Image (cartoon, grey):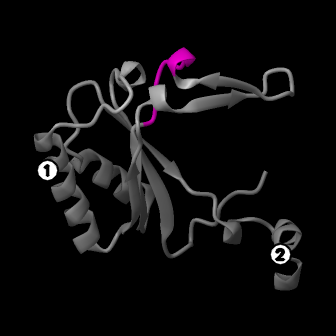
Amino acid sequence: MYVLDEASPTMKFMLLMIPDGYRQAEPGTLPDCDRVAAMMEYNRQMEEAGVLLSLEGLHPPSMGARVTFASGEPVVMEGSRLDATESLGGFWLIEVDSKNEAIDWARRCPATSGETIEVRQVQEMVAFPEEIRELVDPEAG
């Protein structure tokens, strides 16, 4: 396994919002105005700090589908039949200097009781060995 070079100048992280109870939300469920206003202020702060690359909120799982490959073949479950214990409600993609800085941004989120933010570093191609980069882009080698 290749280990990421810690000397990289910046790193990208996804902050994954996992709202409590969102997996049971009815189709079309939207956050209330106060929640949207609080999140918009949080988003503005990240944008002004120059760390925000992208963000999106997601509709509830009841409007989606899940494709599993337990036996190696795809099996589709429509949203109302999902048996997940947690569901993603949205994400922020940020670029910061360290994992600790990404965690600091997650801690500033105006999340409510029971919500979780998972902080995950993005695997960037520059972190992979040359032979893998050449598989993806033979011209870059």
Q: Nearer the viewer, mark 1 or mark 2?
A: 1
Q: Residue at the location (50% across, 66% down)?
A: 11
Q: Residue at the location (35% across, 50% down)?
A: 103
Magenta stretch containing residue 114, yes or no? no
**Along the polypeptide, which appears first: circle 1 or circle 2?**
1
Dominant SS type (magenta): loop
In this rendering, would 4 be left or right of 110?
Answer: right
Q: Tally the marks.
A: 2
Quarter where residue 60 is shown: top left
Name the residue furthest left: 34
Q: Above or below — where is 54 with respect to 108? A: below
Mark 2 nearby-residue class (10 Å; few <14, some 14–19, many ≥20): few
Question: Would you name the residue on which mark 1 appears?
Answer: 37
Task: Give x and y (percent) for residue 32.
Answer: 16, 37
Q: Residue at the location (78% across, 27% down)?
A: 69
Mark 1 nearby-residue class (10 Å; few <14, some 14–19, many ≥20): few
Q: Secondary structure at mark 2?
A: loop
Question: Would you name the residue on which mark 2 appears?
Answer: 137
Q: Which residues are magenta?
A: 80-88
Q: CA distance from mark 1 to mark 2?
A: 42 Å
- Most foreground residue, 18 or 30: 30
Q: Above or below — where is 133 with respect to 35? A: below
Q: Above or below — where is 65 with respect to 44? A: above
Q: Above or below — where is 16 with respect to 84? A: below
Task: Give x and y (percent) for residue 16.
Answer: 43, 43
- The three-letter code of the residue at mark 1 reads Ala
Magenta stretch containing residue 86, yes or no? yes
- Most foreground residue, 120 or 97: 120
Task: Give x and y (percent) for residue 106.
Answer: 31, 48
In this rendering, would 113 be left or right of 137?
Answer: left
